[in-house]
Amino acid sequence: MIIMRSEIFFAISMVLFSLMFISVIVRAQESITLQTVYAVRTEIFKNDTATLLDISATNGTVSHFASSNTSYSIRVLSNNGNELFRGYTFISFSLITDSPVSIEFNSTVIQLRVPFYANAKSIAVYHFENKILDIDLSKKFCNSNSICDLGENIYNCPSDCKPPQSEFPWFYIVVGIIALAIVITIYLISRKYTIIQV
């Protein structure tokens, strides 16, 4: 039985392009698993003030926020004051117990994860439209070490972060060239030889 050269070429080509397609899918899934977030822990007081306890940048997921407007919100603001993100959260200063009497507190601590934006300059906590906490990201993250670290961007740390440049898709081009070179090599070899199976 004679196996045609074109059939061999087609089969090998399909295998190579399948492998290339799978590698692209795997790479895409790795890039969307986690995102950079700001983890903010703050103490909210009943008298409409707040204190920042801790803020860090990490890879993770954004907190689940209330689906409807509540009286408290956390907002990510750009360098020119535009709102990049707003998330509503429930704040309670009462502890409900089994007895008919609830315990009242003067403050409560919340921890929320908000998304990272390349042009974020500050994060603010609001009670209705009253800003009760303003976090200047440049004072919390810019360490002036000439490396654009997690949490830094061109607006909150211009000394470390350069303006964003479009990333050239080297990975996909290299994979495509290798696959094309293998296909051409196999085609040239299959033109010289015919596989005969008895």
Image (cartoon, rainbow, N blue to C red):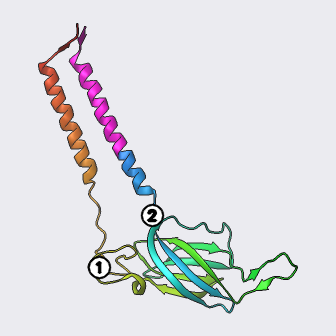
| Residue denoted by label 1 | 160
Observer-nearest of 159 and 106: 106
- Say which quarter of the image contains residue 196: top left
Kindly state the secondary structure of the residue where label 1 is placed: loop
- Say which quarter of the image contains residue 68: bottom right
171 with respect to 194 (left or right): right
**Residue 86 location in percent, x, y?**
57, 73
Of labels 2 and 1, earlier in sequence is 2
Q: Quadrant of the C terminus?
A: top left
Calculate the distance from the C-alpha at mark 2 to the C-alpha at mark 1: 21 Å
* Label 2 Cα crowd, 10 Å radius (few <14 / some 14-19 / many 20+): few
Task: Please tell me which residue is depicted at 22% across the width and 10% down the height of the picture.
Answer: 197
Q: Please, is residue 120 above or below residue 66 in the view?
A: below
Task: Please tell me which residue is depicted at 63% across the width and 86% down the height of the picture.
Answer: 44
**Residue 80 location in percent, x, y?**
44, 82
Observer-nearest of 102 and 2: 102
* Label 1 Cα crowd, 10 Å radius (few <14 / some 14-19 / many 20+): some
Q: Quadrant of the N terminus?
A: top left
| Residue denoted by label 2 | 35
